[in-house]
Every structure is written in C-alpha cells, then in structure tokens.
Amino acid sequence: MGNSMKINLQVWRQKNAKTEGRFETYQVNASPDMSFLEMFDVLNEELIEDGKEPVAFDHDCREGICGMCSMVINGRPHGPKQAVTTCQLHMRSFNDGDTVVVEPWRANAFPVVKDLSVNRSAFDRIISSGGFVSVNTGNAVDANSILISKEVADTAFESAMCIGCGACVSACKNASAMLFVGAKVTQLSALPQGQPERESRVVAMVNQMDAEGFGACTNTGACAAECPKEIPLSVIATLNREYYKAKLNGK
C-alpha cells in the first residue's frame, strides 16, 4: 500500500445498552486517501479473518448526506475537521503512528445498540410529533406558485441543512437536542406552508424532546461548533421565541 500509515485505534466495544463497555486496542495499516469509515472497513475485514467480532458502526450514504456515521473521534463528534461528517473525514487528517480514540454518541436518549452504533429514534419521534406540514396535496403544485422572499428562503434552507446526525447532542454537556429541534422549527416557521400549525408544532416538538430525556440548553455553543452542517446557534433563539409565543397564546 503506497504511503501506508499505522494508526493505533482505541475503540469502544459494548454488546448492548445493558452491558458495560470497554476500550479495545487495534492497529490498522491505512492509506492517507482512505476515509475514516474505509479505515474501519479494513479493521473489520482483519477482525473477521481472525475469527473475531467486527466493530458495529452506522453508515449509509458515505457522502455526508444521511448523518448516520456517528462517531466521537478523539473527543469530538465527527472528528477534528470543521463542517464534515465522519464519512467525509480522511486519514490524511492524522499522522503515522497516531493513537485515535473512537467512541459512540454519549447521551441517555441515544442508547447504545452495539459498539459505536446508537439508537437515535428519539429524533424520529420528535419529528413525528410536529416536524411536518399537513396539506392536501392533490396534483403537484408548481414550485413557484407561492412567492417567498430570498431572505426567508435563505433562512429556511440554512435550517433545512440539518441532517439529524445528533452531533449536537453528543457535543453538549447536557445532551440537549435544542439545535436539532431549533433547526426543524425554524425551517417550517419561516415558510408560508408552515403557518397553520406553527404554534401547535413547536409545543408538541418541545414536549416530545423533554419526554425523550434530552437535557436543557445552557448556551455554551458546543452544538453549533461541532455541527457538520454549521447550523447557527440562532435557531435556538428562534425556537425559544416560537415556544414562548405559542404558550402565551394558550397552546
């Protein structure tokens, strides 16, 4: 392998949410051009060849779109680079001989399924509680039939960039989901299509967030700092305003 580099891995291994986990140490020969997940593919191939249990981790698109690749790498969700997911992180971001510590998201609301894989269905339940618009669609409507100003469209699109990976929860000392919920509420509250359910939506989503056991926001900003899509902290302010207005109106 050209320009091969040796990486010392300390990987969290845990059978399920009810068993204690531990770090296991491995050494992997990797190419600088490999993605972090491809390096884990190599590790798992070697483990399988040795008759050992491969490391369970989540992945799907491997293009920074789906948000599945949830790993805490040397203490940072998605690793040392800004605005990238784990699958977009390349081994050239590390040096030959480095020790790399890999853990799952740490949050009570994200129970460990196995090893680095966690159950993030709490996010799905928050979306199901109100993160949608209810409309009778009928025939497809022309995309430009409702005029939306560029400022509003930009705000909605910026928030819609959230991929629901959960890095914000993992980075937060309180395991708060406010950045995620704030992004979804901001996106829909900005658009005309989101107005009919605007107040009931935010109350339902916040109630579900609390029911799932996520922590409170104390405005440290770790969530926005580690978000791979750079969702701004301002969506949390929007979420708070939307929630308080809805409560004042009796929702």
Image: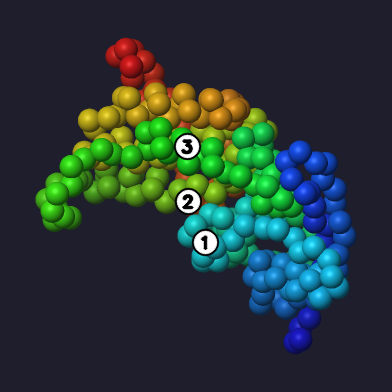
Residue 227 is left or right of residue 126, and the answer is: right
Q: CA distance from mark 2 to mark 3?
A: 15 Å
Quadrant showing the N terminus = bottom right
Percent x, y of residue 61: 51, 65
Task: Name the front one of labels 2 and 3.
Answer: 3
Q: Residue at x 40, y 26 (%)?
A: 204
Q: In the visual, does 109 lie left or right of 25?
A: left
Q: Quadrant of residue 105?
A: top right
**Percent coordinates x, y for residue 32 in the rendering:** 71, 76
Q: Considering only vertical position in the picture, is 107 above or below 80?
A: above
Tell me the amino acid under the disc marked 1: Gly
Q: Which residue is mark 3?
A: 125
Q: Earlier in the sequence, mark 1 or mark 3?
A: 1
Indicate which label's residue lies in the foreground, 1 or 3: 3
Q: Which residue is mark 2?
A: 163
Q: Residue drawn 13% across and 53% down? A: 139
Upstream in sequence: badge 2 or badge 3: 3
Q: Secondary structure at mark 2?
A: loop
Q: Nearer the viewer, residue 9 or 45?
A: 45
Position above or below: 126 against 206: below
Q: Nearer the viewer, residue 30 or 123?
A: 123
Q: Residue at x 75, y 60 (%)?
A: 55
Q: Is residue 27 left or right of residue 199?
A: right
**Tag of residue 209:** none
Q: Seen from this angle, which residue lies furthest bottom?
A: 2
Q: Kindly check if marks 1 and 2 are in contact, taking CB atoms under 8 A apart as contact.
A: yes
Spot the residue most to the front: 51
Q: Is residue 110 left or right of residue 8?
A: left
